[in-house]
Amino acid sequence: MARGNRDTLDFELSKRCRYPDNILLCVRYHMFKKLTASALVSLLFAGTATAGGTYYDCDINTTRASGGWVSEKLAIIMKENGQVLVSDSVVLQFNKAPIVARVTRNNDRKMVVRWRLNNNVNSQNQQTPSFDYTASLTKSNNKVHVSGSPDGYPNRFTGSGTCVLKNG
């Protein structure tokens, strides 16, 4: 399905989900959307992480206000050569592959990872030159907080959750 058609379908289904008589359709749609994103991200993590190194497999709780800009599944992949990659459903939609990230803080308590997605167009055809993301991971309890901000807009999208450290 072409991207524009899928975005139109997403919008139409989200409108229908406001009414109780469509509850079964909405449940099926959201389950499919979650499973598809999780399956894609999980498959990608496995292939990338097995090359050596470790990765954090994170489940993120998002709100409706996040507008889909913060994914429910996130991987922070640390390769043996020191390179850090990030992958989630947003990265895969716009970049088609995990994106190189930079670690701005990494000590025994906290790790902060930042990445940028360039040239984004949302379902309303609004263009954003870049979208900056930050993931802050507290190592003692593996809690993570993710935020994303589009350049040129005042919006800030957030989510939080937990991660599991896995070896590749």
Image (cartoon, rainbow, N blue to C red):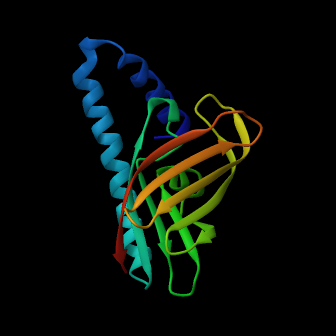
Q: Residue at x 58, y 63 (%)?
A: 112
Image height of 119 relative to 100, above or below: above
Q: Which of these two is toward me, 84 or 122? A: 84
- Residue 137 rendering spot, x and y as whole percentages: 48, 61
Residue 91 left/right relative to 37:
right
x, y percentage for residue 59? 36, 53
| In front of the other: 53 or 129 | 53
Residue 49: quadrant of the picture: bottom left
Q: Which quarter of the figure has residue 149? A: top right
Pick the residue in front: 79 or 120.
Answer: 79
Q: Residue at x 48, y 72 (%)?
A: 77
User: Percent position (x, y) of residue 116?
Assistant: 67, 56
Write the residue at 77% across / 37% down.
Answer: 152
Where's the N terminus, which quadrant? top left
Q: Is residue 107 left or right of residue 168?
A: right
Residue drawn at the location 24% of the way across and 12% of the way down: 21
> In this picture, is 55 found above or below 26?
below
Q: Please state, as top left, top right, bottom left or bottom right, where the C terminus lies in the image.
A: bottom left
Report x, y in % for residue 134. Answer: 60, 55
Q: Residue lying farthest left?
A: 24
Label tally: 0
